[in-house]
């Protein structure tokens, strides 16, 4: 098989989304950009006052005034460019920083939706640059414990169904209850098997947690 055909057979690489929670991330990115503009404005006002005081000591001839006006325009242009660059840089930094928080929160929100549907989520690792690693690890351990407890309860329920079926001959009135319990046991077993947990390691593995390759 040629390299071109092999590459065509591979699934496309997932595109990285930086705006996972658009409202949250843009809010703080704009706040950081606004803070950058405020800092730049305060610095610009101070610089302008110093410039006015310095130029007031110069001789008032026309050539000097023209030179000062030209330097004022250059200074104003440089200041506006620096202020916009600072605001854009801080805004971009805000998106990157909030992405490291919004990403894990988005993933855990998805896991909660899967749990609410009666299934167990397929866990994935956090990126090395993500925040909330300890909280995510605790969340993963909690899901582990829930799955172990669910499996134990399912086994008890299945054993009760087997015992009740064995006694159904002498107590036929138990048949509806046995069928209901059997359906509940099947639903729980299906939930456990439908999306089995991948023991994917975190960037910083918890003590006692197995690590594996991704």
Image: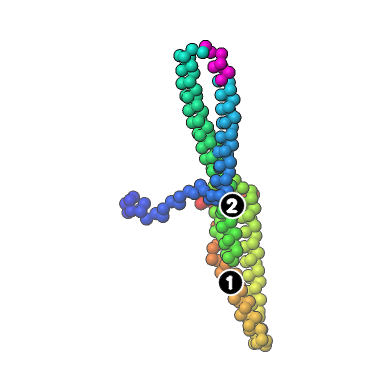
Q: Position of residue 9 (x, y in %)?
A: 37, 55
Q: 130 above or below 74?
A: below
Quadrant in which the N terminus is drawn: bottom left
Residue at 56% across, 54% down: 107
- At mark 2, the secondary structure is helix
Highlighted magenta segment, given as a residue range: 52-59
* Nearer to me, 8 or 46: 46
* Nearer to me, 97 or 76: 76
Q: How is the image coloured?
A: rainbow
Labels in figure, total: 2
Classify mark 2: residues with Cα within 10 Å, few (<14), some (14-19) or many (20+): some
Q: Is residue 128 visible?
A: no
Q: Position of residue 205 (x, y in %)?
A: 60, 48
Q: 30 above or below 112?
A: above
Q: Quadrant of residue 40?
A: top right
Residue 55 is one of the magenta-drawn residues = yes
Residue at 60% across, 64% down: 116
- At mark 1, the secondary structure is helix
Disc number for residue 201: none
Q: Position of residue 86 (x, y in %)?
A: 53, 34
Q: Quadrant of residue 38?
A: top right
Residue at 49% across, 22% down: 72
Disc number for residue 187: 1
Disc number for residue 105: 2
Residue at 52% across, 32% down: 83
């Amino acid at each position: 098989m040629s390299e071109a055909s092999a590459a065509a057979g591979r699934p496309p690489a997932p595109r990285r989304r930086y705006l996972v929670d658009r409202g949250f991330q843009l809010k703080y990115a704009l706040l950081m950009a606004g803070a950058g503009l405020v800092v730049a404005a305060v610095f610009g006002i101070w610089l302008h006052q110093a410039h006015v005081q310095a130029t007031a000591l110069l001789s008032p001839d026309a050539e000097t005034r023209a030179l000062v006006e030209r330097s004022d325009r250059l200074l104003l242009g440089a200041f506006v460019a620096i202020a916009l660059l600072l605001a854009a840089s801080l805004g971009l930094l805000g998106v990157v920083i909030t992405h490291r928080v919004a990403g894990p929160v988005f993933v855990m929100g998805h896991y909660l939706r899967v749990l609410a549907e009666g299934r167990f989520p397929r866990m994935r690792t956090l990126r090395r640059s993500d925040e909330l690693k300890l909280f995510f690890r605790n969340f993963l351990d909690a899901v582990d414990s829930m799955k172990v407890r669910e499996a134990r309860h399912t086994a008890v329920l299945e054993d009760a169904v087997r015992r009740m079926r064995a006694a159904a001959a002498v107590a036929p009135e138990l048949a509806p209850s046995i069928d209901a319990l059997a359906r509940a046991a099947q639903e729980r077993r299906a939930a456990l098997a439908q999306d089995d947990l991948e023991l994917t390691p975190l960037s910083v593995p918890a003590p006692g947690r197995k690590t594996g390759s991704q």
